[in-house]
Image: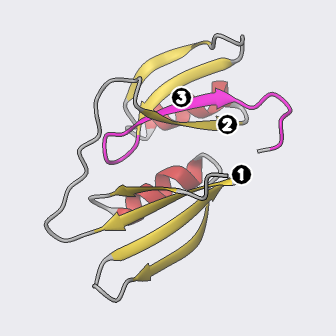
Amino acid sequence: MLKHVSFLSRDVGAALAFYARLGGVTEKDLVTAEGHRRAVLRLGEGRLQFFGVAGEAPAPHPHWAEHVAVHVRGLRALLPDLRAAGVPVTRDLQPSPGGRDMAFVLDPDGRQVELLEADGESI
């Protein structure tokens, strides 16, 4: 079973705030023995971990094929709110292959994030 996925972040606080808007809950936010900021965010049963390391920058691939996928509730209302907050939308609202609402946005580090309507699933 997957424990977490870890990413570099230019601004760990901005990453936490962004994913909190998608339903994420911060579980840890600390400074490591090496002096790096480390935060763990729970999204349903999964975890994302972010590191702020001086002199290091994330380099996410711009293609949507490399992405983080998140179930959300109320995507049709959430997407305009994200857009109004300046979040770049890279694939507008459309049906997913399974027929659910889906869209892609960029997180604060430029990482592609697929938003997929939860439709009654526990998230």
Secondary element at tag 1 = loop
Front-lying residue, 4 or 94 = 4
Q: Amino acid at mark 2?
A: His
Q: Give residue 105's position: percent from left, percent from top.
A: 44, 31
Queried whether the magenta region covers residue 119, the answer comes back as yes
Q: Indicate the quadrant where residue 32 lies.
A: bottom left
Q: Amino acid at mark 1?
A: Gly
Q: Is residue 94 above or below residue 85?
A: above
The residue at which mark 3 appears reads as: 80
Q: In this rendering, which labeled residue sits more in front, label 3 or label 1?
A: 1
The residue carrying pointer 1 sits among few (fewer than 14), some (14 to 19) or many (20 or more) residues within 10 Å by Cα, namely few
Q: In this rendering, which labeled residue sits more in front, label 3 or label 2?
A: 2
Taking the view exactly as shown, the residue that stands out farthest to the bottom is 33
CB atoms of marks 2 and 1 within 8 Å: yes
Q: Earlier in the sequence, mark 2 or mark 1?
A: 1
The residue carrying pointer 3 sits among few (fewer than 14), some (14 to 19) or many (20 or more) residues within 10 Å by Cα, namely few
Q: Is residue 54 above or below residue 49?
A: below
Residue 66 relative to residue 82: left or right: left
Q: Which mark is residue 44?
A: 1
Q: CA distance from mark 3 to mark 1?
A: 23 Å
**Who's the residue at 53% across and 51% down the image?**
19
